[in-house]
Amino acid sequence: MVHTFNFGAAAIAIAAVLAAPAAAQDAADASGAEASTVDASAEQSGRVTVRAADLNPRYGDIDAFYGDIDAFWDDISPFYGDIDAFWDDINPFWDDISPFYGDIDAFWGDIDAFWDDISPFDKAKLAELGNFWATTATQFRETETAWSQLAADADNAVLANDVRTKLDSLVATSSAQWGASVTAKTGQSFQQGFVDTIFAKHQIDPNDPASLAALTARERAAFFVDWHDTLMQYAGIDHVDHWMGAINWTPSITQIQGSTGRSVIGILDSTVTGSADLADNVISSTGHDGFVGGHGAGVASLMVGAHDGQGVMGIAPNAQVIAHNPFDATNSASWTDVRDGIVQLTQHGASIVNLSLGETGKPFSGEWRGVFNDPTIAANAGNTVYVLASGNEGVAQTDDIEWGGAFDTSFILVGSVSPDGTISAFSNTPGDACLLNAGVCGEGDALMNRFIVAPGEMILVDDGHGGLVRRSGTSFSAPLVSGAIALLHDRWPWLSQHPDESVEIILRSARDLGAPGVDPIYGAGMLDVLASQSPLDFNDMYYKLFQRSGFYFYGRNVSATTLFNMGVPAWWETNDVFFTLYEDVGDTYRDFSVPMSTYTMGKRTNALGGGFQRLQDFVSSRFATWIHSKGADRNGNGRAGFSQIRTGGERSAGDWSIRYSAAMPRLVEDGSMAPVHAAASITDPSNRFSLTMGHGQGAMALSGSRFGVISDFDRDEGGVNPVLGFASGEFFTSASLAFSPDTQLRLGYSENRLDWRDINTNDVTQRLYQRELGAQNAQAMTVDLEQRVSDAVSLNLQYTRLREDDALLGAQTDLDLLLGDGSHTDALTVSGTAHLADNLRLDMSATASRTSAAEGQMLSTGDAIRSSAGQIALTRSNLFAEADSFRIAVGQPLTIEQGSLDLDTLQVVDRETGETGRVTQSIGIETKRRMLGELVYATPVLEGAGELGFFGRYVSEGSISDDDGLMLGINFGVRF
């Protein structure tokens, strides 16, 4: 691919813009004509010909290298460093310009549609290129410094030698990076295939001081630019240009938004044929065959240039192009030619018409009213957006324009900004002019309200011959806007029938520049592609959910803000499940698919270190209050244990037995002490009936005497009926009736209210979520039958009915439509205890459960959710000392074996028309099987008044809880 550069006078001109804007304005003023053009042949001979009512492409004598538009040094380098669109500080999908923020970022995390897997660039290669150009930039600066001194002192041999040495260094550095690629592509050495060619092209002989000194500052700038652009053709990636970061665009946006490529762009310009990079997009090309300096091809390349590893990348490379060339042999066109061209484009289906042409000296001509009011063109006003370049004379619109009858036409006027974001010196601006309706300027009818800016200086474009060229002018700002609209129409095809809304989206999403709000210079501000493809205001968005009532469903809109506090557990496999958000724009809407997993509840921050954070929770809630039990073994003798509950008892009159149990309170956030467990039991004289009431570890109290450590019953990590663990923590009660000395029936009730204050104080994220969601309420009823098989063996069968108010197995939401009526779980637990010897006991437990969501919710369970858990523990007493205890336990926490939830929403079912319909998505919620292992040793101290314990616990990695890994600890308790 050959790169070419235009210097001095362009092939054709429209605005009589000379090398500097001031000179351009002088030329425009001198003509005195309402509509002036520059004839190409006349320009070359030094003569200017004025032809009324003719138009030309919106570029001409705009030298891409004049003034302060230096592409390679200072703060506005488009090819490396701070304005690199694909790495470092202006990454458009991170930090300050993300349209979603915080933990509810729809474009980040595990299912980020704009990162990693679909990036068209090799990140390692980009990093390598970035490092190379950072090094080369220094060489450019140093070379230019010496070169500018030589230009001022041409006979200085020392300076000439310094420039030659620095050029040799530049060649050596570049050869090391690119030599092999150049040789592979050209069959020549780096010196022959690149260096000699580019030196000859710019008339440079490093060994001839006169040729070096002869180059002007602009010519030297052109050389450096050419060095960069020509080398980049060997990079194997499409060219990265400064405009990409400036308008917040990357190819990843296009891959998502423009993947279907339905939009049709009309290009009214010189011929766009002759470039292989554009050939696949052009489905029709009519009109004259004038090339006009490759203007049309350059404009088209910014819209539809292929993403194929070479050349220019267009914003909408999958869009189709219908082209019409209105320019005759004189490189000019009349308004009649323009009208006929637009008719050709709109009648062939173009929903966007790019018009990089106009009258000299006029940002916006009143003649457009006549064109848009033409009956044939007006008939398509409801399905066409017009994008017009404002022109390159550096003038502001001064005249109001009578626009009556054309207000139904949707158009955007586009100006140019330099790489540093300031208005280009050559760019025309809207001024304070107004579009009048019968002579009256209505509210919002100022031309500035339809004006936007985009980069237009030193833009790398297709030259129409298979090469590349850098050009400047509003002609190359306008197609960036047209490309952004094409992406809108690709993603939301029905917007092509809503041109006003298409314009509104582009203007409202623009990044404000200049004076706050819309102003006479920048209009609405800078084009922002990312913002235009994102919700304009998240707070105004809503969901269309289906409410179930009996056998019927009805739609209901729910504000998106109500879902900020919604919780969906991170362990749900929801990568393919989306909430569809809707945004109303004018008379239509846009839909956005937001992954469910962005609304996660229960993420844990690692700010304090996972081990420390988890250990604090482990100690405070499970092990810090171990108290050595003095319960009775099967022979009625006192024994050591791990009940964590301090138990005592006494006889009252009538031989009724009163027993109490308590655990040391724990310190909570506000400095108060919260009880872990407290209970009292009363038993009749015959020991057949007993009643227990208490506050605390209900799961443990309702499960008999086996498995005496609180963590065994934990909802997330316990293996002993963790279903009951969801309702353990607050009030509980049980009643038991012994049918015989060996058979006992128990009825129980337990409840829990998990408040944000009850969550580990180090877990800031979890506590914040829980505070926003509100307390999590659960209640459970149990029925269990205890049977002693022998003096050494007893068995238990326990049925649990768990009711969660607004959650499902701990997954909570405060949105009633989703899980407001909660869920219920039925669980069956089989457990047993075997005394293998006087000092050795084996406890076993297995639980199977079935969970269903309540009827009438958005989240429903088509098939019941089935879960399992289990644990086995071996306890040995009197191991090293009298009354000490050692326990080893292995188990499986609650695991969802199978099940899914169905989500009924209204989604777009016809992407051409935007028609919505009911869609049911299935959310897989199976969890990864986890295993736990635990070693505990406790021994009495202080003559039995206290206890010293050591523990170690390992939990394998899983899905329900983030707590995994190895934990070690020591505890000490004293009885009072």
Image (cartoon, rainbow, N blue to C red):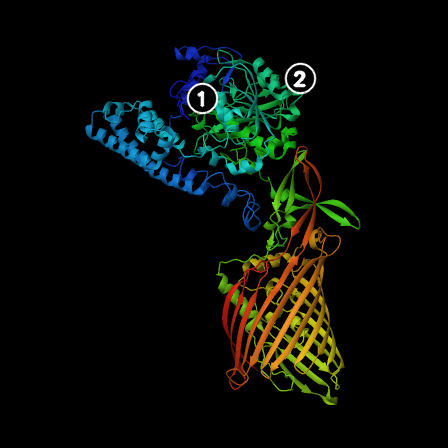
| Residue 163 in sight | yes
Residue 421 shows up from this direction: no
Which mark, residue 942? none
Q: Amino acid at mark 1?
A: His
Crowd around label 2: few <14 · some 14–19 · many ≥20 (10 Å): few
According to the picture, the residue beneath numbered tag 2 turns out to be 375
Contact between marks 1 and 2 (CB within 8 A): the answer is no
Horizontal relation, residue 777 to residue 328: left or right: right
Badge 2 marks a residue whose secondary structure is helix
Badge 1 or badge 2: first in the primary sequence? 2
Secondary structure beneath label 1: loop
The quadrant holding residue 811 is bottom right
* Residue 382 image point, x, y percent: 66, 25
Q: CA distance from mark 1 to mark 2?
A: 38 Å
In the rendered image, which residue does mark 1 sit on? Answer: 465
Q: Nearer the viewer, mark 1 or mark 2?
A: 1
Q: Nearer the viewer, residue 73 or 956?
A: 956
Identify residue type, mark 2: Pro
State the residue in front, 114 or 149: 114
Residue 487 place in picture, x, y as percent = 57, 33
Q: Quadrant of the C terminus?
A: bottom right
Q: Which quarter of the rendering shows the N terminus?
A: top left
> From what the image shows, is residue 722 above or below residue 791?
above
Q: Height in image: 421 above or below 154?
A: below
**Nearer to me, 652 or 281:** 281
Q: Give the image location of residue 258, x and y in percent.
A: 57, 34
Left or right of 313 on screen, residue 924:
right
Q: Nearer the viewer, residue 452 or 849?
A: 849
Residue 29 point in image, percent of width and height:
45, 16
